[in-house]
Image (cartoon, rainbow, N blue to C red):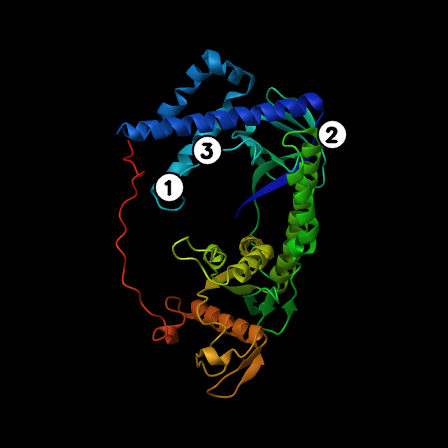
Amino acid sequence: MERLQAYKFELRTNGEQLGKLRQFAGSCRFVYNRALGLQQENHKAGLKYIGYVPMANRLPKWRKEEGSCWLKNASAHPLQQSLRDLDRAFQNFFAGRAGFPRFKKKGDGDSFRYPEPKQFKLDQANNRVFLPKLGWIRYRNSRKVLGTLRNITISERCGKWFFSVQTVREVEASQHPSTSLVGIDMGIKVFAAQSDGENHLPLNSFATYQRKLAREQRSLARKKKFSNNWRKQKDRVARLYRRIANARADYLHKKTHTISNNHAVVCIEDLKVANMSRSASGSQALPGKNVKAKSGLNRAILDQGWGEFRRQLGYKLGWAGGELIVVPAQYTSQQCSCCGHIAKENRQSQAGFCCQSCGYSDNADTNAAKNIEAAGHAVLACGGDVRPELREHVIQAAPVKQEPAEAIWAIA
């Protein structure tokens, strides 16, 4: 079995190397934005979409122009990769998988990539990595990199620079030591409720630092923009955000590691987090209701990291020889896991469930997890429509004919 894996480390740069990293990231951002602007002008003129190859042929000319000759200081491979990234963004847009590509902003996700292994070297024995036109850079080595190197990505996050190297290696197909199947219901009061009765309480890393973060942001707003004190305060806010993200990532890795090692098959809901956390403010003509309460709910949902939890469970179960099953989320909290009766009145409170038909009572989250487990059993048994009892409860909306987007172009 072929395993793709990425290893991320923090770079230990000196002043000269730090300046070059920022310059290279700025060069890649400039090429990306210039190509995007050219695509927009090309579309307004009624011409066809410019593919990657003809766009990349313009790159040598840009590096020779008087206004952008400084692009020569950066390696050509990351600049070409920026054009590949833009082309992939447009292909996702044409296929309906993503929105229209947007211009990149300075300081927002600065990064660049060397796509071929021959373009860099990794010396793990001496804790250093070699990058073209940057030389050898030391890094904080925390674990051994296994497999054949494929590409390397340099990125900035909260004032610190990291590199992520992707590897590939052949491993034997593993067999999971456990034979159990468990259903998991995701929530806010209880982060993950298992069908066997075990509950995982949430960390709520953002809520823990919310008041301190608001205080630091108010202090940032009072300072003169781009002054030295403003930059120092901005770094404080960035460090606080990094602490929140690191705490959440650490919590999710520990929970997914435990669950993937203890259970061979895990069933979870197919939650549409983007729809669940959508703003309720509405418009000026049609203002929303309970906007403040919905805003707090949205923060609580996004603070849990449900999407990252699902992603980590998927690859960790695959590595351990297990399987992740995703089932529809409709009515799992209103359906009785004993008789299958579905009613809104069954969910009496946040934690209480009592079936109005058979009288079965249980914790609401555990009951939902049991329904998810049953749906997972149905998928393993026959697949297809795993919950046919929901047909009479789901209102089928009339299909809406969607007009083609104005910005969708013909591909040459």
The quadrant of the picture occupied by the C terminus is top left
* Badge 3 element: loop
Q: How many marks?
A: 3
* Badge 1 element: helix
State which mark lies toward you, 1 or 3: 3
**Which residue shows up at 51% across the image and 64% down it?**
268
Circle nearer the N terminus (2, 3): 3
Label drawn at residue 103:
3
Q: Amino acid at mark 1?
A: Phe
Q: Amino acid at mark 3?
A: Phe
Query: Callout 3: 10 Å neighbours few (<14), some, many (20+)?
Result: some
State which mark lies toward you, 2 or 3: 3
Name the residue carrying label 2: 126
Instruction: Out of 185 and 138, give the one closest to the viewer.
Output: 185
Circle nearer the N terminus (1, 3): 1
| Residue 336 visible to an observer of this rendering | no
Name the residue carrying label 1: 93
Query: Callout 1: 10 Å neighbours few (<14), some, many (20+)?
Result: some
Q: Position of residue 24 (x, y in %)?
A: 57, 24
| Residue 255 visible to an observer of this rendering | yes
Q: Answer with the quarter of the image where residue 343 lies.
A: bottom left
